[in-house]
Amino acid sequence: MGIAVNLVTYLVGVMHLPSSTSANVVTNFMGTSFLLCLLGGFLADSFLGRYKTIAMFSFILTLGTGALAIATKLPQLRPPSCHASASHTCKPANGFQMGILHVALYLIALGTGGPISDCTRHWWPYI
């Protein structure tokens, strides 16, 4: 997923988190994305079918992407910008700001689970 490098850069540069915390957030997000593919495959095979699962999870993915766009655009959902120096440290994101960001990321992770599990399974012979 190409989001990983950009997300670490955003978390360090805009949200003023330490590199280790940023890397932890990204690896948790990516691991959850890949594990939720099992849920998408199970729901598609057992209950919903391929097309309903893709439609439902794509809608969730759209909600998560919209929430992430809002979280990055609204100034209330970001810490104030600053230029760090040796005598001045930047104020990191507070719990509310990080909570909104996590909700957006995990909506994206949940939304990724359906289409990846269903589409790649049926496209695999053609790739």
Image (cartoon, rainbow, N blue to C red):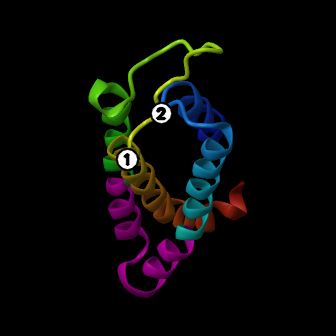
Label placed on residue 37:
none
**Picture quarter with the N terminus:** top right
Which residue position holds label 2?
92
Q: Residue at x 48, y 31 (%)?
A: 15
Left or right: 16, with 46 as reference point: right
Q: Residue at x 70, y 57 (%)?
A: 126
Residue type at numbered disc 1: Gly
Q: Determine the secondary structure under disc 2.
A: loop
Q: Which residue is drawn at 55% across and 68% down?
A: 37
Q: Give the range drawn in magenta.
A: 37-60
The location of residue 122, given as percent across then percent down, is 59, 66
* Label 2 crowd bin: few (<14), some (14–19), many (20+), radius 10 Å: some
**Distance Cα–Cα, label 2 vs label 1:** 10 Å
Left or right: 7, with 100 as reference point: right
- Residue with the most extreme front position: 87
Which residue position holds label 1?
95
Q: Please state which of residues 8 and 84 is positioned toward the viewer in this rendering.
A: 84
